[in-house]
Image (spheres, helix red, strand yellow):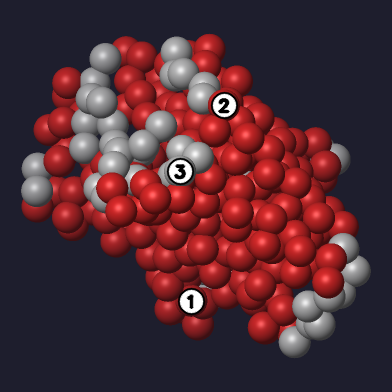
Amino acid sequence: MPARLGVMIAVVFWGVSFVATKFLVGQISPLALVSARACIGAAALGALLAARGERLLPARAAWPALLFLGFVGVSFHQLLQAYALTLTSAISTGWLIGLTPLWAALFSIFARRERLGPGKLLGLLIGFLGAAWVVTRGSLSAFAALPSTRGDLLILLSTLNWAFYSVIGHGTLVRLGPTSATAGAMSAGALLLLPVFVATHAWRELLRLTPAGWAAVFFLGVCCSALGYWFWYAALARIEASRVAAFLYLEPLVTLAAAVALLGEPVSAATLAGGAVLVAGVALVQRARS
């Protein structure tokens, strides 16, 4: 599969994932949802490794790094977003996820000591302004109205966490390859979740899922956690990171369309305006020279 097509598919999956998660947290807890999603994703990636004739267990030297990545990028990250979606809408989440490349640009500047040129600085400021506009629904004084904006703030935290995960995971990706690295991190995340999942009897919640709920869980596990992660990192191994990141501009639009069509969520003028400003800031950062 061409790398750009794989990235496009991943972005579509992830854009719809917030709608599926918003639907599911109305039926089961974030812990039950994320545990089931991670286990299904790990099983799907294990099957992919077997089909490709690759070893199922990475070298022991890679286990500490994979455990750390599994915690940061799978268990903690997905729990953070699932819990946040009990407090905010899928549409706001989709717009705010567009902030991730801005954090990635900042990490790149500090990690690689790149110069922060005027174009990137302007883009960062515009992106943060758009994010603040979405979080506060157009009124900056709404920051004082917590916890009504707590869900959006948690989504903002998840964008920072994902950018951090992408930066620290690059070395492991290079050493193990995208398939082994993705499968290892996903399996580690599932293993970290399982003890809590069993001890709290969260598995019982899965018994009350509707058929539509089970379909959403398998969509998140197979399409979003397994294929989405794999397509994304396979593309990073073949295409410049800035070109791959550019596809994230489409994710808020996918979420918006899916949330309106599947959940009937309302779209406010403030959300549209703030989201447009956010995406414009991200685009400016990616296009600007250092």
Earlier-in-chain disc, 3 versus 2: 3
In the foreground, 163 or 169? 163
Report the disc number at residue 139. Answer: 3
Position in image of residue 177 (x %, y %): 68, 64
Find out whether the residues at labels 1 and 2 contact each other: C-beta distance under 8 Å: no
Kind of residue at badge 3:
Ser
Residue shown at 79% from the left, 51% from the top: 283
Residue shown at 47% from the left, 68% from the top: 69
In front: label 3 or label 1:
3
Position in image of residue 285 (x %, y %): 78, 60
Kind of residue at badge 1:
Ala
Q: Which residue is mark 1?
A: 65
Residue 171 shown left or right of residue 182 in the figure: right
Residue 97 shown left or right of residue 247 in the figure: left
Tell me if I can see residue 161 in this picture: yes
Q: Which residue is mark 2?
A: 269
Earlier-in-chain disc, 3 versus 1: 1
Kind of residue at badge 2:
Ala
Above-or-below relation of 218 to 174: above
Residue shown at 78% from the left, 78% from the top: 116
Earlier-in-chain disc, 1 versus 2: 1
Give the CA distance from mark 3 to mark 2.
Answer: 12 Å
Residue shown at 24% from the left, 53% from the top: 194
Q: Within 10 angstroms of label 1, few (less than 14), some, or many (20 or more) residues?
A: some
Give the CA distance from mark 1 to mark 2.
Answer: 44 Å
Above-or-below relation of 165 to 83: below
Q: Within 10 angstroms of label 2, few (less than 14), some, or many (20 or more) residues?
A: few
- In the rendered image, the residue lying farthest to the left is 200
Position in image of residue 163 (x %, y %): 58, 64
Q: Quadrant of the N terminus?
A: top right
